[in-house]
Amino acid sequence: MQPDHGNTGEIDTTTEPPPPYALDGGTSLLARLRTLRDRHPVHQDPATGAWSVLRYDDVAAASSDWSTYSAELWRAYPEEWGKGDAWSQGRLTETDPPRHRLLRTLIGKAFTTRTVAALAPGIERTVTDLLDAVADRDEFDLARDLADPLPVTVIADLIGLPPQDHALFRGWADGLLSFEAGDLQGEDLVKAIDAAGAELIAYLREHYRRRRAHPRDDLFSRLATAEVEGRTLTEDEVVNLGKLLLIGGHVTTACSLGSLVQSLLEHPTALAEVRADPALVPAAVEEAVRHRPAVLTSLRLTTRETTLSGVTIPARQFVSLSLLSANHDERRFTDPERFDIHRKPNQHLGFGQGIHYCLGAPLARLEIATALTALLRRFTSIERTDAPLRYYRNPSIAGLKEFPVAVRRT
């Protein structure tokens, strides 16, 4: 999708696109976003063709208006790409009402406050097992040894997938998170993403058929046999919901946990406060999700001509809602670059907004808080080693792929 240089939101297309988050953990990107928020809060990105929306109020408004800013991106793709209505079955984050409401109501039962609270003992055991596995080491990789396997284990257990397959899920998630920036309408990129998820889809299809024939007491069995308005979900709907849970649940928790620990190590006073008063852990989690949201952008497709911050966006255009920029908007947050565990109010957009607010946010909060509490209880000191940090290179993700730390025990 090429920039329309005649539009009122035009910027100089010779300008370098914003630097990737992976370059330096977002420092350069945030500096560029601050300039763009002031000068071009809504503009067409010369690298991708998508319209970037950067201010908090605009991002929140667009996120809450699904009728104008549709999640059904596939409607912009040519029919021969095979991205029609049948392809979208069960893709909750790429579905608008009324179908979205039906799917979310069904799967949302697995993420109520009461249901998530009942998972706490199992999450605590998983965290203990993961930390026990590095008990004989003074250095370990916090991303690889804790942040990555924790959500995979929790979600796989919830769905009812066998423990011996957890390494497969992590590999598939890594493949799906490894894409770099490209034309959002490019056929090669779309097909490459589909290919990366093909093995996971095939695995989940096999699991669906087993659970459909022989249901058990797990979420996948309930989805495979559930009725919604007088009909059962199709195989495609259940399989795509399963994929969303595995990948989405992994990204939010793994990246946010790593970012939380990273921010605390960068702010020793905050770390000391949280260590001295565990009641501050939930606030620290929220501030980490604001400061370094796991998902940097949320894509939408305009269904009609619309206006944001005085800039007209035509119909059938991709719109990139920058959650990172919104969470650092000076118009909404005082001193937004500062990591402040006492920030009040803290109505960030790190988990999204509107009908697509992160379904698993309560579970992610519980996993992250449980892991941080265990880390602080077990180790008197946690420090970065001299080894470099390594970030996911996907332009939509903020998270550490490698996070080597040195620890001292109680």
Image (cartoon, rainbow, N blue to C red):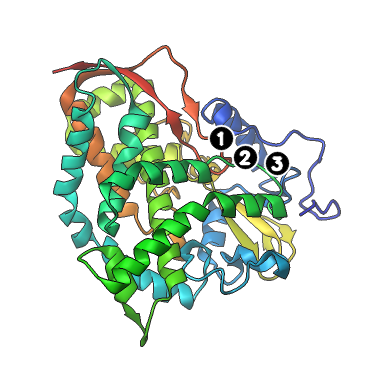
Which residue is denoted by mark 3 in the rendering? 39
Depth check: 301 or 222 in front?
222
Residue drawn at point x = 42 percent, y = 45 percent:
251
Secondary structure beneath dot 3 equals helix
What whole-number distance in Å separates the C-alpha atoms at marks 2 and 3?
26 Å
Residue 213: give x, y in percent of width and height.
29, 73
Q: Quadrant of residue 368?
A: top left
Depth check: 264 or 358 in front?
358
- Circle nearer the N terminus (2, 3): 3
> Relative to residue 374, is residue 30 drawn left or right?
right
Residue 128: give x, y in percent of width and height.
17, 35
Question: Where is the N terminus found, in terms of image quarters?
Answer: bottom right
In the displayed structure, 111 sits above or below 229; it is above
In the displayed structure, 248 sits above or below 208; it is above
Secondary structure beneath dot 2 equals loop
In the displayed structure, 27 sits above or below 75; it is above
Residue drawn at point x = 26 percent, y = 58 percent:
160
Residue most toward the right? 6
Residue 72: give x, y in percent of width and height.
58, 66
Which residue is denoted by mark 1 in the rendering? 393
Residue 383: give x, y in percent of width and height.
32, 17
Badge 2 vs badge 3, beta-carbon distance below 8 Å: no
What whole-number distance in Å separates the C-alpha atoms at marks 1 and 2?
6 Å
Q: For the residue marked with disc 3, what is the amino acid?
A: Arg
The reply to whether residue 204 is in sight is yes
Q: Quadrant of residue 394?
A: top right
Badge 1 vs badge 3, beta-carbon distance below 8 Å: no
Secondary structure beneath dot 1 equals loop
- Numbered disc in front, either 1 or 3: 1
Tell me if mark 3 has few (under 14), some (14-19) or many (20+) residues whose alpha carbon lies within 10 angstroms of its own: few
Badge 1 vs badge 2, beta-carbon distance below 8 Å: yes
Which residue is denoted by mark 2 in the rendering? 180
